[in-house]
Amino acid sequence: MIVENNVPLQPYNSFGIVARAQQLVRISDESDLAALRADPQWRDAPKFVLGGGSNIVLTGDVKPLVLKVEIKGLRLVEETPRAWIVEAGAGELWHEAVEWMVRNGYPGLENLALIPGTVGGSPVQNIGAYGVELQDRFESLDAIDLETGRAFTLDAAQCAFGYRDSVFKHVRSGPNDFGLAGRALITRVRFRLPRPWKAVAGYLDLERKMAETGNFTPSAQDIFDWVCAIRRAKLPDWRVLGNAGSFFKNPTVTPEQCAD
């Protein structure tokens, strides 16, 4: 474990905002977190977990110890007649992980192509696009409690997924509250990709692509390519012009409000 000082954060946030971390540690596996907790200087220090930096707006230099999540790895954990279970390290870039799965014959996340950020950030936001949400393809995740150092695993129910929401976005308000905002560092995520694969192509933009191409039985690679093309037509490349992708939320209304 190496603690770096005065680290520029401009490359680590998708808006490209100029800021610095007073101290930063790169987390490449669980042993780095164990070493951090074993060091009295850092065990109880305030911490700031940083993945792909696509869900943050830095307003100045970061004083808490920055934990830059760089845990890698992509592998097929299990294959059953009903699903492929694929595991990804939290530090993998989301789009590259989706591309790897489609290329290696594990489809199911192609509608979520080209979303900026890392795998570890995907369950925090319960990311979604073009008719698919993460919770639709989620199996479980591993994480570390930053307060106790304890490793734990959560399934979908325990993650309390909602519309762009999860337990990781809520602060614990009492001893029996399971809010994990600021308390957990996700290390690995596992996805349940249904077999047989079925295209999710009911979204209007995808229906237009089918009509334009005359391809009404698209493959997973077709969906992946279409989603990438649609997103590139709507949004600039964040590496050229800083942005956080599409981050709007649709309003939630009651049936009574909808009837008005």
Image (cartoon, helix red, strand yellow):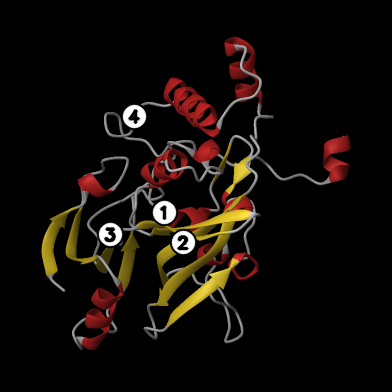
> Where is mark 3, residue-wise?
70
The kind of residue on which mark 4 rests is: Asp
Q: Earlier in the sequence, mark 1 or mark 4?
A: 1
Camera-side residue: 18 or 136? 136
Mark 1 or 4: the one toward you: 1
Q: Earlier in the sequence, mark 1 or mark 2?
A: 1
> Where is mark 4, residue-wise?
237
Q: Secondary structure at mark 3?
A: loop
Instruction: Answer above or below: position of 133 versus 43.
Output: above
Whether the residues at callouts 2 and 3 have beta carbons within 8 Å, the answer is: no
Give the CA distance from mark 2 to mark 3: 13 Å
The mark found on residue 189 in the picture is 2
Is residue 247 visible to us here? Answer: no
Camera-side residue: 127 or 221? 221
Give the CA distance from mark 4 to mark 2: 26 Å
Give the CA distance from mark 4 to mark 3: 22 Å
The mark found on residue 119 in the picture is 1
Left or right placement of residue 213 versus residue 240 in this view: right
Give the CA distance from mark 3 to mark 1: 10 Å
Mark 4 or 3: the one toward you: 3
Instruction: Answer above or below: position of 30 versus 174.
Output: above
Q: Measuring 32% from the left and 42% from the top, which residue is drawn there?
A: 14
Is residue 214 visible to us here? Answer: yes
Specify the quadrant of the image occupied by residue 196: top right
* Quadrant (top left, top right, bottom left, bottom right) of the C terminus: top right
The kind of residue on which mark 1 rests is: Val
Mark 2 or 3: the one toward you: 2
Give the CA distance from mark 1 to mark 4: 19 Å
Camera-side residue: 198 or 118? 198
Q: Secondary structure at mark 2?
A: strand
Whether the residues at callouts 1 and 2 have beta carbons within 8 Å, the answer is: yes
